Amino acid sequence: MNVSASPFAHEATDYYTRLLRPVFAGRKFLLTGRIAVLLGNLSRMLTGLGADRPFLLAGYEGTGSIPGPEDGELRLLGVEGTDILAEERDYQRTLDKLSPELKRDIDSWDPDGTARCIHTSALAVSRPVADRQSYGARPAAWAELEDKVRIDTFWDAVGVRRAPSRIVAADYGVVRAAADALSSSNGTVWAADAREGLNGGGLGLRWVRPGDDGRDSFAFLSGIANRVRVMPFIEGIPVSIHGIVFPQTVAVFRPVEMIVLRPSTGDRLFYAGFATAFDPHPDDREAMRRLAYRVGSALRETVGYRGPFGIDGVLAKDGFLPTEMNTRAGALLGPLANGSPELPLEPLCLAIAEGERLDYRPDLLERAIVESADKHRTCAGWSVTRTRIVDDGSFNVVRDGDNYREARAGEEPHGAFRFGPTPAGGFVRFSLQKERVEPGPSAAPEVVRAFRIADRVLGTDFGDLETAAIARPLEGRHSIASP
């Protein structure tokens, strides 16, 4: 066990391991996910709880250590795509038409057909795979709340303060009129509905800057959407707050910064991961936690929700304004438990969503994760790139003035890069050494510096990137965000 973890983290790890072992022991699970590397940790957690060796269906290997034979029976489906959303769509289509040979392999692994399927992709629709029913599936009423043209109605019903918006038909004149009515000094943001499936990574968003008529942005959005949400561009730090809905209460955690960068030109926002180094003003932190509790309670009351959720938004000059909700275990949930790597958080979330009747002790989980997240900070950023990267690799960097350079032999590195191939081109990840992470400031400027050296060393084309302005001082201000 991690000796640097807090007493609550030790207690939570021991308790939830004992609690979940009878749920998962002796059972078989078929794990699906676009990237094989990301399936390994869940596979090891499940087998650590006594589950049988899983069957893993992945689109491609990914960057890092792929699961070994001891982790599961791995099959790569060879998906393709020009970006992560296209890859995901291709992967989901491939799951629906598995080859007869692959189905026979699954039947050989699970001859009595009792295995359950776990969809690890954030954008997956819960459904059977190879005739194996989903475990921890989310009903359509839960998934629909991720649609950006639906969520504002939920905010209003719950009484959540938000930015103004208009939901309009995908007609250029109508969208343009809405943008003219709502534009801020930084323009507007247009978001597609979920006609083609849920969107992610900012790929269904377009930032229409002042002076841009938005015709190119509309041409893209009208190809994937029937309706469009228009709202003002909100200046501030992009952040997210997570919680878990239990049968009787809601556990809420702490804010996480989303690394959303701004190219110098164009209509795209550049999503580049997340970090826990950033500390909002304490009043904002508590306002966001109260908001998450209220939203989680409303989710349970209105759609019978169970399990993890996240609220994304912007910490603006007058407090937090939500922009969307993820009704699932979002990628940002894992780093909150970064200091408790043996805590079986993902299996726990699956059991809650499945409706397993257990003594979950939400207060223990909340305290353990908040304490872990406050103590163990991360400063990192990553992205796919259309630059073709052929092999996996890594290199260390040191800070030199306002930039990074490659570390020389014998130098103590400040950070590290991992890189590797993807169907779209390549993947790059930067992480600052944990002893170098300074709690408080936004991590985004550090990620911008990191991408500059990626362009020099790897030949990527991230280009000139800007960070959000800190529209709200960290100290000396009181939040007027939703109570």
Image: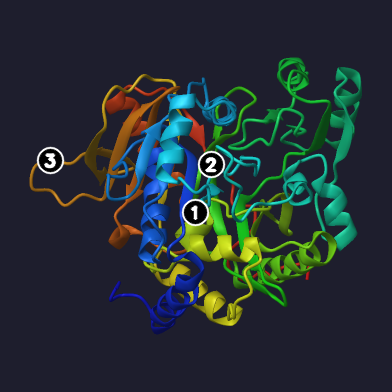
Q: Amino acid at mark 1?
A: Ser
Q: Position of residue 432 (x, y in %)?
A: 33, 51
Q: Using the rendered image of the protein, determine whether residue 291 is visible from the camera's viewpoint.
A: yes
Q: Quadrant of residue 125?
A: top right
Determine contact: label 1, label 2, CB under 8 Å. Answer: yes
Residue 442, labelled with which disc? 1
State the residue position of label 2: 467
Q: Residue at x 74, y 59 (%)?
A: 318
For marks 1 and 2 on the same chain, the one whose residue lies earlier in the sequence: 1
Q: Which residue is mark 3?
A: 408
* Residue drawn where x is 71% and y is 35% of the image: 186
Q: Is residue 349 above or below residue 394?
A: below
What secondary structure is found at the residue carrying circle 1?
loop
| Badge 3 vs badge 1, beta-carbon distance below 8 Å | no
Left or right of 359 on screen, residue 211: right
Q: Residue at 34% of width from left, 42% of height from top?
A: 402
User: 133 or 8: nearer the eye?
Assistant: 133
From the viewer's perspective, is residue 326 above or below residue 175?
A: below
Nearest to the observer: residue 374 or residue 107:
107
Residue 446 position (above or below residue 23): above
How packed mark 2 is, by other alpha carbons closer than 10 Å (few <14, some 14-19, many 20 or more), is some
Classify 10 Å Cα crowding around label 1: few (below 14), some (14-19), many (20 and above). Answer: many
Label 3 and label 2: CA atoms lie apart by: 29 Å
Q: What is the secondary structure assignment of the residue under circle 2? A: loop
Q: Amino acid at mark 3?
A: Arg
From mark 3 to mark 1, how far is it between C-alphas? Answer: 28 Å
Look at the image and name its color scheme.
rainbow
Depicted 317 relative to depicted 2: above or below:
above
* x, y percent for residue 197: 70, 33
From the viewer's perspective, is 154 left or right of 256? right
Quarter of the image that includes the N terminus? bottom left
* Secondary structure found at label 3: loop
